[in-house]
Amino acid sequence: MSPAEAEEFRFDASEASDLRLLTTKLARPHLPSTYVDRPRIAGMLDEGTRRPLTVVSAGAGWGKTLATASWAASPPVPGPVAWLSLDENDNDPRSFWSYFVAAIRSSTEIPRGNPLAGLAPGLGGRDGSHRRLVSGLTLLPDPVVVVLDDFQLVREPAVLARITGLLRHPPAQLRLVLLTRVDPALPLRRLELRGELAEIRSRDLAFDVPEAVALFAADGVPIGPDDVRLLVDRTEGWPAGLRLAAYFLKGAGPGRTAEAFAGNDQAVSEYLLEEVLTSQPPELQRFLLRTSVTDRLTGGLAEALTDDPRGQRFLEQLERSNAFVVGLSPDRRWYRYHPMLREMLRHQLTLVEPEIVPDLERRAALWFASNGQPIEALRHSADAADWPLLGRLFVTQAAPLMLSSERAAVAAQLSRVPAGRLTEEPELAVTAAALCLHAGRYQEMRPHLDRARAQLDRAGPEARIATSIAVHTFSAAVTRSRGDIDALVADSAAALDETSGPGTSLPVSDQYRAIALSNLGTGLLWCDAFDEAETRLREGLQLTTAHRLDASRINVLAHLGLAAAVAGRLHEGAGCATEAVELVDARGWEPLPQAATAHLALSIVHLRWNNVDEAQSQLSRSATAARPEPAVRCAVGLTQARLYATLGRVEPAREHLARVRGEFHRWRPPVLLQRWLAVTEAEIDLAADDPTAAIARFGPPAGRQPPFDREQTCLAEALLAGGEPYRADDILAPLRAGTHDPTAAVEVWLLTTLVADRLGATDRALDALARAVDAARRAGVRRPLLFGNTEPLSRLLPQAERWDPDATALLDELLAALGLARPLTAVVAPATETLTDRELTVLHYLPAMMTNAEIAAELFVSVNTVKAHLKRIFQKLGVTTRRDAVRRARELGLLGR
C-alpha cells in the first residue's frame, strides 16, 4: 500500500504517528527469490479459511509467515486478504482494533454507508466500536481474510476478550487467520467442537524430504538425497534449521558436511554468532551489533545509531545475502532482523560493549522523536533509563496525546519512570500529573503541576516553554473536571499565548494550540461571552480539522452547536452538533464526554422544533456522557426541568431543578448557567400558574445589564400572566425593533399578539400573529405556538392566512395541532394502518408537489428522513406513487379536497 493509500485509511493524525508505520504494518512480507512454494500448506489454508478461524501455531523459524504470505499472493483465495503485523504496542486495545479496521479497509473497497468506512476505535465506550465492527463485517459483500501475524505478542485480556466475543457469533464474511508462536488464550476447543476451527501446527509446517530437496536446489546447494534426509531428520523439518544448514553448506572451508551441522538451539545460536556475525567484515559486525537495539530499522535510523552514512546500503546488502534480515515493505524502507538473530546480537552487544547500550537507546529515542514517532521515542528513552530525556520528549512531543485516544500507549511508557524520580525535574512532574489524568485522579494532578511550575527555571529554553504550556494544558483538564470555568479560561488563554510566543517552535505547537482553543472557547461560552467563544471555537475548528484531531474537533463542534442553539440559530446549531455526533458514532466512541454538549444542543433544537420525543432522547444521551463535566451536567438538568415545564409536569421539573441547585451549592456556576437557572425557575413558576414568583426571579427590568432576550420575553410573559399587559408591552418594545435570536423573535411577536388581544386591539394582534407565524416558519420553530395559553391563538389563527399566504402548510399544521381544522390525527379506514403525526405532516406537503429536499428544508430534517417517511406512508396507504397517496388520503379524510 502506498503512503497515499495509507492516508486514506488513517484513523486520526494523533493516533497514527507515522503513515509509514501504518504502511509497514499492513504490508504482506516480501517473498525472497529463493522461496519454495508449498502447495501442501496452501491447500491446508484453502480448507481452513472456509471456517471462521485458522490458527497457524509453531515456534520461531517454522515458516508460518512466508507460507501464509505465499498462499495469500496466489489466488484463488476465499476473498481479499488483509494483513496485519503485530507488535508489543498492539496490546493497547485502541491500537489493535484501529489497525485491525485499517487492514480490512486497505484490502477491499468498503461500500458507502458501511460502518467500517469511518470506524476508528479508541475513545468512548468499546461496546459501540465492537458493535459497529461486527455490523460492518456482516454487511461486506464478499468474505475477507484477516491475517494477524505474530499474534503471540498480544496478551492484553481486553483484546483477547473482544476476539473471543467476535468468534462466539462470527460474522459470516470474516475469516480470521492467526500466526502465532504459542497457542492463543482463546476457546479453541469449543470452536473445534463446533467445526469452526482449523489448525496448522509445526508438524504440518515441517519440510518433508521432497520439499527440502527443492529448498536446497533453490539455494544452489549441491547435496545428495541421503544428506537431505539426514538434515530433515536432524532438524525435524524445521525450515529455519534447513535454511541455516544450506547457509552452512555453502560456506568455504573443510568440514562443511551435513553430518557436521548441529541442530540444537545452542548450536544454532552459536552458528548465528560464528557464521552470520563473525563472517561479516568488521564494519558490518559493528553495524549489526549497534542496530540491534530497535525492533525495526530504516537507513536513517541505522545511520543515527552507527554514525555511518551507509545504513541503507548495508541493510540492502544484508538482505540480499540472506543474513536473516527481512525487508518489511516493497519499497525496502523498513527492515527487521530475524528474532533469533536479534536476540543473539543484543546479547552479544551487552557482553562486548555494555557501556554504549544506553547511548544507543538515547540515539534511537531522538531519531524517533525527530521523525514524528513520539511513543517509540518514549519507549527507547525508558529503555535507556534516561528519565530526564523521557520527560523532555513528553512535554515537547507527546503530551497532547494524553488528551487523545493514544493516552494508554503514552501512559504505559510514562509508568516506567521510578516513582522517586518523578520529583526531580519539572518535565517529570508533568509526567506524574499525566499519569494521574490517565487514572482519572484529577485532584491528585494539582500538587505535581504546582511542583512543575515551581521548578521551571531548571529546564532548558525549549523544554521550559513546553513544560509551561503542558502545565497550563493539564491544569485546564483539572479545572474543567471541577467546573471552575474562570480557571479554565485563564489556563487555556495562558497556554494559547505561550504557543504563539517568541521563541516557540515546538513540534506539537499546533496540537497544543488546538487543545487550548477548544478549552478556551468552551470556557468563554459558559462565561456567557458568546461572540468571543465562537471566534475561538472557529479557530479551533480549522486547526483540529487540519491536524485531524478528532477528539478536540468533536468538542469544538459540540460547543459551536450549543452556542448556535442557545442563540436561536437552530439550523446551524443542529448542523454542528449533528456533525459532532456523527463523528462519534462513526468512530465508535460513544459515550464520549465531549459529545455530551452536542446531544444537549440537539435536545434544545428539537424541543424548539416541537420534536419532544427526540429532544428527550438526545437529552438522555447527553446525561449519560456528561457525568465528568459539572457544567454540562447542570445544563442537562436545567434543560430536563424546562422540558418537563413545557409539558406541564411541574413536580418532576421542580425535582430536577432542586438537584441542580444542590450542585450549585458545591461550586460556583458560570454566568451562563446562573442565567439559565433564572429562566428555568421562571418557566416552572409560570407552568405552576405563579407569575408573581416568576417576576421575582428577574427583578426590575432596568436591573439587568443587559438581560437575555429570553429573560426579557419570560419576564414579559410573567407580567402578562400577572395582569400587567402595559408593562409587558414596554418590555417587548425594544425587542420588536430587532433581535439577533430568531427563536426569540417568534416569542416576541407571539407575546405581542397576546398583549394586543388582552387590550382589545384585534387588528394589531392579527398583524403580530402573522409576524410570529412567519418568523416560526423561517426559523422552523413550533413549540412556543403550541403550549401555554392557546385560547387566543385558537380564535386568531384561522384569520392569519390572509396576511401570510406562504405559511399555509404551517398554519394548517398549527390548526390541526390545536384541534381546529383537518386534525392530523384523523381516524383512517379500518383497513389502513394509522399514520404517525410526523407522517401526516409529510403527507400534508404532497399536494404542493414539493421536492423531497424542499420538504426536508421545511421540516428541518434530512432528505433521507423524508424518504423514510414517504416509504412508510406509501406502505400504510397501499399505494406506490405520490399522486395515489394524495388521492387515497383524500378518500380517507386525511387531506382536504
Image (spheres, rainbow, N blue to C red):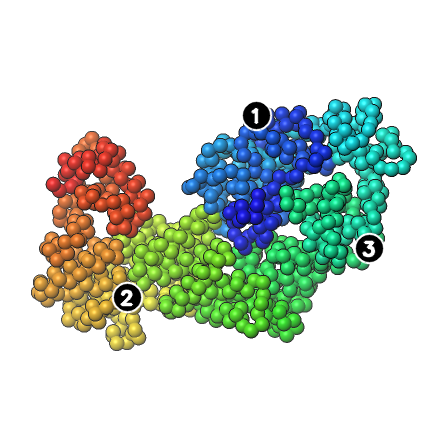
The amino acid type of the residue labelled 3 equals Glu
Of labels 2 and 3, earlier in sequence is: 3
Residue 305 appears left or right of 873: right
Of labels 2 and 1, earlier in sequence is: 1
Picture quadrant where residue 830 is located: top left
Residue displayed at 37% across by 65% down: 673
Of labels 1 and 3, earlier in sequence is: 1
Q: Where is residue 321 shown, x and y percent of the image?
A: 76, 41
Q: Where is residue 338 shown, x and y percent of the image?
A: 73, 42
Gap in angstroms between the C-alphas marked 2 and 1: 67 Å
Q: Which mark is residue 195?
A: 1
Q: Residue 740 carries which label?
A: 2
**Closer to the camera in the image, 193 or 198:** 198
The amino acid type of the residue labelled 1 equals Gly
Q: Quadrant of the N terminus?
A: top right
Residue 830 appears left or right of 301: left
